[in-house]
Amino acid sequence: MNKNLKIIISGGGTGGHIYPAVAVAQALQKKYPDADILFVGAKDRMEMEKVPKAGYSIIGLWISGLQRSLSIKNLLFPFKVLHSVWKSLRIIKSFQPDAAIGFGGYASGALLYAATMKKIPTVIHEQNSYAGITNKILKKRVDTICVAYDRMERFFPARKIVKTGNPIRQDLHHIENYKTEAYQHFGLNPDKKTILIIGGSLGARTINQSIKQQLTEYMDAGVQLLWQTGKSFYQTGKALESGRLKVYEFIYDMHLAYAVADIVISRAGALSIAELAHVKKPVILIPSPNVAEDHQTKNAMALVERQAAILIKDQDALQNLAGEAISLLQNQAKQVQLKNNITTFDMPDAAESIVNELLKLLKKD
């Protein structure tokens, strides 16, 4: 190669878009240490904080999604899209990328649209079993579409699809090596069973309310809780904190969190499932009902049908979650079954596979 590889990566809004993007950046730098990588995200969204923490530069676009309710903000949407495409064209002209990769979210839509206008090789990655609106809009323009689920021909041209799986962060490999450090980090007792609660990067109202409402049941069972609340519920959760209840707005060191977890309570986002399959943890999934085409339930059912997870419906969590979680903690045979079966969903080389698809477009080995 006669010059350093230059790649733009875009995606954001939630951890489900951001962390696969970071994982691919890490895989790319592992193969090409001198690669120049620039992220493009949406101003005021979590990627503007999370991406720099991962060690990468990011530029923010003035873009946000349509509001579900009638809102004056929706009147600005067309102007935001035009402004973001225009700014993306300026970024591309300045940075001169060899290729662009999109991971979903409105910023990704603007950046990848601009890249295709400039005939730059493009790859998009769809994390879920039901395609997001941004990727569906881009499907005819981009060169390659990497997916994590089968039957994605429903949404995309079959000739462009490559099944790669969902990329996970490098620090989630070999989490068993971090156990001692993890207990010390969170101030937890290694002699007690630990439940990890993760409602997604932005939190999950039903899960949070359920933990609060049923907290006595957990404490009476003698277990420890490591609870990621998200921003909106953090102060409420923090007020309940005790020696056996550790509360965080956001857990940055997820490799340590998984290391201490005996079981996990989680939403059923595609990234969460990919991580749980890799770290091989028994999991109770509570799919969010507030997503397109109820795709989290579809994600969860793929595991449940192969006895790889337990599913509790969102409307049942306030009543049943604590009982199910404590029962699972006490059932070693069920834990082993869930761990063994969730392993079959692990695609640990997903990030490398996406990088390889990108390099094919650039005709590099």
Image (cartoon, grey):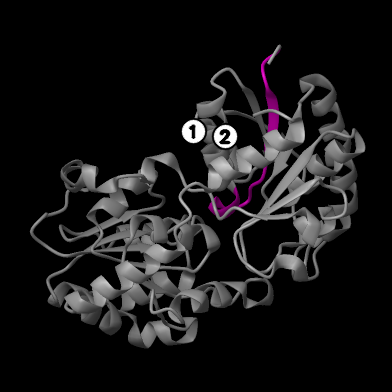
In the rendering, at what x and y percent does residue 101 appear?
A: 70, 40
Question: Is residue 218 shown above or below 4?
Answer: below
Q: Quadrant of residue 73?
A: bottom right
Q: Give the tally of numbered discs.
A: 2
- The kind of residue tagged 2 is Ala
Quadrant of the image containing the N terminus: top right
Q: Indicate the position of residue 96 as horizontal and vertical percent values.
A: 79, 22
Residue 28: mark in rendering = none
Q: Is residue 51 magenta?
A: no
Q: Horizontal placement of 147 versus 337: left or right? A: right
Would residue 5 be seen by someone viewing this image from the given angle? yes
Secondary element type, mark 2:
helix
Q: State the residue in front, 69 or 293.
A: 293
Q: Indicate the quadrant where residue 123 lies.
A: top right
Counting from the top left corner in percent of width and height, residue 200 is at: 48, 60
Residues at marks 2 and 1 touching, judged by CB atoms closer than 8 Å = yes
- Bounds of the magenta segment: 3-17
- Residue in the image at 19% along x and 79% along y: 331
Kindly state the secondary structure of the residue where label 1 is placed: loop
Query: Relative to 270, is 79 on the left or the right?
Result: right
Image depth: mark 2 or mark 1 in front: 2
Vertically, is 196 above or below 81?
Answer: below
- Residue 11 is inside the magenta segment: yes
The residue at which mark 1 appears reads as 54
**Label 1: few (<14), some (14–19) or many (≥20) C-alpha neighbours in 10 Å:** few
Q: Pick the residue in front: 153 or 253.
A: 153
Three-letter code, disc 1 = Ala
Q: Quadrant of the C terminus?
A: top right
User: Residue at (68%, 22%) from the top-left corner?
Assistant: 5
Which residue in the structure is indicated by mark 2? Answer: 25
Do we see residue 232 in this rendering?
Answer: no
